[in-house]
Structure formats: structure tokens, C-alpha cells
Amino acid sequence: MPCFAHILVVATTLSAAAVANPVVKGQPDAGGFTLQAENVRRQVQSGPMSVYMTHLRYDADVPPALAAAVKGGGSKLGRRQGKQQGTAPSADSRHDTEWLTPIQIGTPPQTVRVQLDTGSSDLWAFSTGLEAGGHAIYDPSKSSTATKLPDITWAQRYVGGDWGSGDTAYRDVVKVADGVVVKNQAVLPATNASDGFLDSPYDGIMGLSLLDFGSTSPLDAPRPKNFFQTVLLSLREPFFAADLKAGKSGFYDFGVVPPNRHKGKVVYVPVNPYPIRNGAFSDWNITLAGYAIGKSASFTKRRFDTLVDTGTSLMYVDKKLVEDYYAQVKGSHYDAPAGGYVFPCDAALPDLSLGVNGAGLFGGINKILTVPGSYINFAPRDETKKECFGAVQKSLEFAGEPMSILGAAAIKAAYVIFEDARPAQDTPRIGFAVKDL
């Protein structure tokens, strides 16, 4: 794994004063670092379950047929969910579900594996007080550098209605790469967690959204800064980038782009402000310009907003796009109990190109964000393995409005840069670049 700073020490507090100037030793002009993300394919996870979990994560309305199939104890899907655990790849694991990164918290260091998640903001890890099975834990009582934050509790719900909570919060040292140490980073020890989390391959989550920690209480207490906000002023350039890869480990780059990460120019799209937060920026939400299906298809202009979320596996996009896509897949159909489109597992799937920053980029040549058809075959629908579940599905319904999400199925098809250059620039933005797949 490349390392671009031998020793980078960052200090932070919980106040609005942000991050103090870093103390850098070894390579003072490096200005960044890289984290390796191990690709983990769950042994048992269905496409319908992934759809169901994403609905619950975003408090979206769950279609009744999908809810009945998931909760029905006698259904195949219900039985599969009861067995969902482990991280070993199986013969039918065509899909990528998580990319995990080891970090070390405290002094002496305690190693946990976390999922880097652009759809949330908190950094938490399993801790003492719960039966964490084979998971690694963070025990602040064993860290000489842990400082308790007074009167802070937290509770967070994520994928699948899964949740974590705790009655304490701490600041501690977090080491994320060789010699890259972040001082006084807020960390939430999870002393309660749902079975779904305990059955997952990760030991915690590192949120990288544009918000401060979102799960802490009381609400009027100062909110801790998330990891990206903590290190932001220590980076040569104000961004991190996701280089997720199909079927193998990927990388997260902070502040620097190593050689050969991408080809050609980076095309940037501004992040949309969140209206109910008085125009503030909270999520990595952008507007796409349209789509093209197949290698030589014409471009369809159709604007829609979407979150770009490394913590979601599938793509939930504009309804017309989805209908147009599966109209070109022989044998495909919408399966209500499955919660989405399915097709014969041996079907030929066309590529899907998404319009980034306007239709002018396409012209039949320059397709910045093109998802290969092979990425869209997510997993067999059930044990028969006759039909497979698509990684492209219709937008969720949230408060009566469509809600689109570009998950890992799309993110792994490009080099994706999440930049926040405020106040030098008024608006955060996301960049997309072509890379070798």
C-alpha cells in the first residue's frame, strides 16, 4: 500500500475552531496519505435483502410485497436472512458488499476494521458491554490517551434498520496508516448493537459525510467533527477519493492522487445544498444529466439528483432509466416480492453510462462514468440460481419523493473524488475520472 506521509500528526478539538496546524515529520511536503480497503464478499446476502436494508437505512417507504417477503419466516428470503453471517466468499458471490480498512485507536493501539461511509458522519466501534462474537473491540478504559466527553450519549441506525448505540463518547488517538496519527479524534464506543451489525464483517464505521457527528445527544451539545473534517486542513488538497475495485481490494486517498489512479481529466459536479438545513451542505448529493445504455447508444437527457454513498451496495436511480435499461435485457422482469428487477443469470447485460456535468461529455466517446454490464449482475435471487438480481434498481420513495443513490456498483466503475474546498470555494463537489477496471 502506498504511504504518502511517514508521520502525520493532527490535533483537533470539539469547538468550531476546527483543526490546528499539523505536525509533520519524515516527508513534510507529502500532504496526504492512502488507506487500503479490503474487499469483503459476504457468504450469504440476497439482492432483495440489500434493497430492504437500504430502504430502512434512509427511512424510506418499504414496498409491502418486499416487507412481507423479508419478514415472512417461512419464505426462502426469510430463511436466508436468518443465516446471514460470515465473510468468506462463496461460489455464487458475484457481488461486492463491503471494503474494510483497519485502523488503530488508543494507546496502546487497538485495531478494528471499519467501513468508510460517505453516507454517514460518525466514527464508532464495538466496545465492551456487548457480546461482539469474533469482532475486535475498542475499550477506552485500556487507552491512556482516551478522554471522556461529559454527558454525551449516542444512537445511530444504519443499513437494514441495524443500529448501534452507547452511553459514552471519547476523544482518542486514531492511527489510520503507517505513521499517520490523528490526535483527539472523537470516537463512539458501541455498547449496544443489532444482530445485523454483530453478524457483519466490520467492527465499526467511519463516516465521511459533510456533517459533524449526527447521532450524539443532547442535541444542543457541541457536535464532534467527523474524520474528514478533522484531517481536512492537514491535507495538501481538500479531498479524499474512493478507488474501489470489483472483486479485490481498493484504496481511499486523502489529499493526494497517487500515480496511475485514473486516466484523463477529472469532471466535477457541484454538491447540492440540503433545503431543510437552511441551504447547508450535509450529504454528498449531486445532479446527473442523463444516461446512455449500451456501448453505442445515444444519450438520453434526464436530470435527477442522487447521493453518492460508499456504504450502499446497489444503484437506486431514476425510474425511466431503470425501465429503459431492463427493456434491453432479455427475460428481465420486475419481481415485487424481491423488491426489484431480476433476469436470467446468464443474460447479457449492457453497460450503463451516466451523464456527469452535462450531456456534452458523451458524444459517443467520452463516457466518464460507465458501469460495465458485469457489475450489474449483483447476486442470484435465491437458492435456485436461475434468476439474478440487478444492481440497478428504481429510486427509493422518501416522504413521497424519489430518492436516488449511487452505491458501490457505480463508484467502483470510476475514480471518485469528494472535495470540500470551502471557504476558498463556495460549494463542495464530486469529481469523476476514468480508470482501469
Image (cartoon, rainbow, N blue to C red):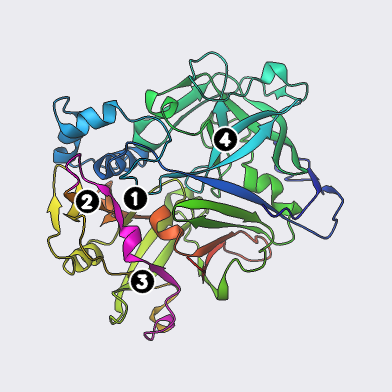
Nearer-the-camera pick, 42 or 89: 89
Q: Are marks 2 and 3 in contact (CB under 8 Å)?
A: no
Q: Earlier in the sequence, mark 2 or mark 1?
A: 1
Residue at the location (56% across, 31% down)?
Answer: 124
**Residue 403 place in picture, x, y as percent:** 32, 53
Q: Which amino acid type corresponds to the residue marked 2 in the rendered image?
A: Cys
Query: Up-down: is 71 above or below 357?
Result: above
Q: Nearer the viewer, mark 3 or mark 1?
A: 1
Depth check, front residue: 395 or 223: 395
Q: Earlier in the sequence, mark 3 or mark 1?
A: 1
What is the spatial separation of the Cα atoms under label 4 and label 3, in whole angstroms? 33 Å
Q: Is residue 122 visible?
A: no
The residue at which mark 2 appears reads as: 388
Identity, as a three-letter code, of the amino acid under mark 4: Arg
Check disc 3: other Cα within 10 Å, few if <14, some if 14-19, many if 20+: many
Residue bearing mark 4: 113
Q: Is residue 295 above or below residue 400?
A: below
Which range of residues does the magenta coloring cover?
361-385
Q: Earlier in the sequence, mark 4 or mark 2?
A: 4
Amino acid type at image mark 3: Ser
Q: Label 1: which residue?
A: 94
The Cα–Cα distance between marks 4 and 2, rounded to whole angstroms, is 30 Å
Looking at the image, the residue that sits furthest to the bottom is 363
The residue beneath circle 3 is 353
Looking at the image, do the residues carrying marks 2 and 1 touch, with CB atoms under 8 Å apart? yes
Q: Position of residue 399 (x, y in %)?
A: 28, 46
Task: Tell me which amino acid carries mark 1.
Answer: Arg
